[in-house]
Image (cartoon, rainbow, N blue to C red):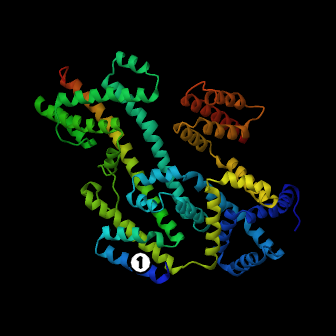
Amino acid sequence: MFMHGPEAKKSTYEASRAPQALHEVLTNPRMRGLFTRYLNTLQNDTEIVRDIFETHKANGQYTQEQITFLNDHFPKFKEHFLLAEEVRYMFDTKEIEQAAKNHEPLRELLALNNGSPQILKRYMEVMAMERPEELRAILDLKRSVNEKRRSIRYKAHERMTQTILKRFKLSNTDFEELKNISNERERRQRFRELVQERVDGLQKAVGWLRGTHTERGIEHAFDTLNQFEKDEVKREIGEHLHAVADVLNGFVRGDHEFMEAIQYARIPGEGREDEGAPEELSDDERWKKNMQRIILGARDLIGDYIKGEASWAWGIASALLTEATGIYNSPNRQETKRNSKKEPKEKSAEEIGREEEKRLEKERFKNPQELYDAVGRQLRENNKKGAWKLVDEYLGLHITRKNDLKRIKSEIEGILIKQKGSSEDALQKLSEALGLFQEERESNNT
Amino acid sequence: MNRTALQTMHDQLEALAQAQDYRAAQALLKDRFMLLPEDLQGRILTMLLADALVSEARMLDGALALENESITALKALEEMRIVLGPDH
């Protein structure tokens, strides 16, 4: 059947591109390893996959029939590969360390490998090939955690700050003092101290009395107001103040113990069905519950592994992935690159790899929010050059004659490179640029 | 680690879990972990990472709920102070 118009054009384009793209995959050890893992999931075609890699191992060549087979499966593999790239981006070493910080078993097992998460990272890439749905679920979970972190740090914290300002009535002198502190960290520190002083003041005023601060408790306190003498009411207030002060103290300190403690705090309507009410568990019981889940999980994974014990291609793919990861993480990578220039054949493979990296870099920030987060992360690490690089690359792709992105981009450059403003200014400008870009895209769509 | 050794480790974990001796189970997992095939190490680490993310999500939910509650409590206290008069 013949195709006409755009459909025919598309088909011709893809047909001419596919062999080159395939060449890129087969000459890049990491991608070849992943492609092998992917092909190995195609149960019906195991024989042909085995032939392909045995042939390649023997003479490094493929037959036309094998190339056709590889080409046929390449587009689907590409989807999996993009997922693997997303995982690499979402779970960089810092993010994994952050997750392990509050999770003893993970921290312990990572420590066995000198704290390096390479095996974990490599396996998640393999999951992109073999268990994409499971991996997507983990990515969704990670996105949700990121969103909650943002809420805590910015939205809810801001609301809390506003409430504290309003309720604890910081004086004009306090505000003047805060305004005169130019260093953001010092200003926050002083603000915390001022709030702490007021919290301490409240505690002294009513005394320390144990209690809870649930909604029910507050309603009860209101009822009490109407029913009892003032002394009785004072006690109720004392209870609530104590609880509120506890919460405020935790936020003011922002300390680790507090955050850990509230993980199991009593939240109305919350609690895991499989565990019963969390507040009923002692620390030891909670630890046991967690370890039980982990040990049984590890036991099941070992059992599954025994049942579906390493298939023939596993060894080849793992070796390729290990080798490739070694290349990617080698501190001497620059040296490798320099040496490769002397050898035209190697240089060609390296170049192809770099082009692929560049292309994937462009596809990395499909969602502007992701770029915003990545830039924010760089700025928090005080890496203004890194932040600028991301902004430069992304906005550079979207500048058109119609929009004002060019102007904003140079303003951001001024802030980040020529130090003409703070990190907050840069993020505000970036937000403005992304808003413009979004508006333009929406108007193009309509 | 060959198939027999894996089966032994599986059975030992099973027995320790049955006996609820999780400290010994944790120690066993730690001692043998580096001997496991790399793929299996990766799978176990991924499971733990997912577990860590679930814990963090719960912790953050708790923190958000407490923030909201404390704001409500602060408002209630303000109201109560008004009712009680200027001394409080």
Q: Is residue A412 left or right of residue A254?
A: right
Q: Nearer the viewer, residue B47 or A145?
A: B47
Residue B6 seen in the figure: yes
Check disc 1: other Cα within 10 Å, few if <14, some if 14-19, many if 20+: many
Residue A351 lies, with reference to residue A75, above or below; the image says above
Residue located 43% across and 54% down the image:
A100
Please state the horizontal and vertical placement of residue A23, each as a whole percent of the image.
Answer: 78, 64
Quarter placement of the C terminus of chain A:
top right
Residue located 59% across and 44% down the image:
A370
Residue A19 lies, with reference to residue A90, above or below; the image says below
Please state the horizontal and vertical placement of residue A281, each as a whole percent of the image.
Answer: 25, 58
Residue A72 lies, with reference to residue B55, above or below; the image says below
Q: Nearer the viewer, residue A27 or A229?
A: A27
Q: Is residue B4 left or right of residue A279?
A: right
Residue located 43% across and 62% down the image:
A109
Q: Is residue A5 left or right of residue A426?
A: right
Residue type indicated by callout 1 = His
Residue A274 seen in the figure: no
| Residue pointed to by mark 1 | B10
Quarter placement of the N terminus of chain A:
bottom right
